[in-house]
Amino acid sequence: MDVHPLKTLLQLQLASDSSAVAHLPFTLASLTAASLVPSPHSPKWTARINSLLHAKTSDARWAGLCLAHKTAFLSQAIMIECAQSWIGVALPLLAKKEPSPVHSAAVRLLRVIFSAATEMNEFQRQVATPNVLKFTTALMPLAESHPDVDLKVLILSTLTRLIPLYPTLHRASQNALSSLCFTFLNGNPFKPPNHKLTTAASQLYAVLHLTGGKVGAANLWRKSVDDALAFAWSSFSSLRTTFLVDGRLPLAIAGSNEPLTSIPLNLDRLRCCIAVLNDLFVATVHRPIQVPLGALVKLALALVTCKKDEKTDQHFDATTRTMESAVTPHIWSLGCRLVSSLAASFGPQLTPHLPRLVSCLTIQLEQESISATRLPFLEALRTSLSHGHALYSTMIANRLAKAVLPIASVLIDRRTDARPAEIETGKSKKGKKRARDFEGDEVFRTGHEVVCPTTDDSQALFCAFVVLRLLLRTASLSAALQSIVCRVALSALLALPEMLPSALSPDPQFHSLLLDEVQEICVEFASASVEGLSKSLGLVVGSCSTQGKMSREIELLLHPRLPPLMRSMPGVEALSLFRAEESQEESDLLRSLGLVSADPPTMESQPAMEAEPVASVVPHATLAPPPMSQQPSTPQLPPLAEKPAPIAAAPRTALPPRPPAAQLQQQRAQQPKIAPPAPPATEVAMQVEDDEKNEEMPSIDLDSDSDAE
């Protein structure tokens, strides 16, 4: 017969207080919901926990609190039975001077008790309601005075969880809770910002409007948004005292004359305001509310479009000017966070403001001075395009594509730049050819270049491809830019499998993530037409094997016409994959974007190089040259030069005149008897057809077997 788990723990691990503390991790890991089912050992278990809670040493009390928390979490029946006695022990510990682990364990135990049995009205009336407000009152001074940051974060998150459950009980404590939040959201110029503490305080501030009830919660939410907006404008104006804000200089605020303290303080305040607005956007409100989108977009545009080097005629302090200019990238990042939050929370409602936001982000992305801080702009663009409606402006979409393409073409530049070095080393002197690397020596090289040396570079490259994919879904992108974007995606799809993950990024998982994104772009473009999708079976199967999402790809293969395509995306056959197929607009765009190193060779520069092989192939295709073959065939070729030439086609240039018949026979006799190279398809077909027309009729043998029949 198996021994009950509680009996084993009581006899061995919990035999004494010191043993309970030493074996606490094993005891907590051994507890399960099945072991806490009511049994003859359950009263002994609860009695042992109570004895630990009333122990004289703090470590034994900490062990008792941890065991009580685990028991309450796994067994609601035991928690309801022992809740009143456990509250009587844990709640007074918050007002005593105890170690941080004891306070943390007491807070966790009380949070589980007050939030686990909300569906039981009698338990709420007798146990929870009389003690919740006492618990909140004990937590507020502990959060303000205790030096442990983790304990403060735990207290703030506990209050954030309890206020939505008991909003009416906390109505009288709203002002005290607001003051507690402002303690951590008012900024600190002497310490680096603690993101965990700021996030916990902003989340608590975002639920305080629920204390107004279902009717007053909407008004309190709007008041909180207006207060955060006013505080953000005040902090932003204090950071731009030497720059123009709305065409004028901001007024100096009293007590902010020292830039060494005022600038870090206001930057921290602005960061806290953006965090509060982000949490208010996702807060729960029981009634319809009116969001001040105009004021929010105005603040976001002011943060995003502020300039780093703005010329003014007035004289300013050089130190203040330098420090305010140095924090401008941080202001850009906060503005991009606000734009992303607005787009994620109010995507469809943000449609009237979307063209202006995308235009400002694109203009900033085009600046060379933000090359090191372009990740926030790309993330804001990705969120805006993914949550909002499609752009209807062709100019904005084309400009955005031109700004993002150079970022995404890093992979292509790496492959094309490596080829000239290989060719140059191959053409070096004989002495240099002897200095060859050993096979496999690249494994031991540690100084190789990485495409994305930092995490920000990796995220920027990934966001660039996501933005290009979202732009391809719109109907506003021009045909030339659509072709260029698809060519860049196809080039990246060919380059990534041949590239080591360590050569792409220090993160080994980034290679697979980027490859999945590029494959998704190519699959979406291939699915623009049934004919293109029928030629992309390998690409679709490859995306299934890497991403593991086969439902969409199988649906594309089985029902390629569903759902109907609502975008005007050209088919795969419309791509210009070669220089000869490019239009003039596409060639100009490639040169302006820096995606080509030099101008493509013109047709007039190759006649001397290409005409000789064509002339040497013609004698093998004709038996007897006609007498009119002396004339050049130039008048028939210029109309064909306007069409894009295929890969195997010879250049459409004027051919030299055909030599006489005697010279052709002499050249044919001097040539070695080997198989001639395959002639270009277009020219050879034209010459063979001409020779067949001019060939002499063979003589017919009248005495053949056919006549006898």
Image (cartoon, helix red, strand yellow):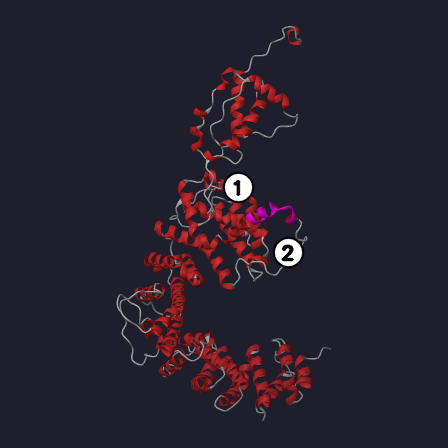
Q: In front here: 229 or 36?
A: 229
Image quadrant for the N terminus? Answer: bottom right
Residue 135 position (above or below residue 675): below
Instruction: Indicate the position of residue 305 as horizontal and vertical percent values.
Output: 34, 63
Q: Residue 126 or 592: which is nearer the viewer?
A: 592
- Measuring 26% from the left and 67% from the top, which residue is drawn there? 313
The image quarter in which residue 260 lies: bottom left
Is residue 382 shown to the viewer in this render? yes
Q: Position of residue 607 (x, y in %)?
A: 49, 31
Q: Secondary structure at mark 1?
A: helix
Specify whether residue 565 is in view.
no
Q: Position of residue 224 (x, y in %)?
A: 34, 74
Left or right: residue 420 versus residue 599 is right
Residue pointed to by mark 2: 442
Q: Amino acid at mark 2?
A: Glu
Q: Which residues are magenta?
A: 420-431
Disc assigned to residue 305: none
Identify residue type, mark 1. Answer: Ser
Q: Toward the viewer: 107 or 44? A: 107
Image point 44% across, 32% down: which residue?
641
The residue pinned by badge 1 equals: 534
Secondary structure found at label 2 = helix
Report, in whole angstroms, how far the alpha carbon at label 2 lies from the one at label 1.
Answer: 40 Å
Q: Mark 2 or mark 1, which is nearer to you?
A: 2
Circle 2 packing at 10 Å, graded few (<14), some (14-19), many (20+), is few
Front in this rendered view, residue 160 or 324: 324
x 32%, y 71%: residue: 240
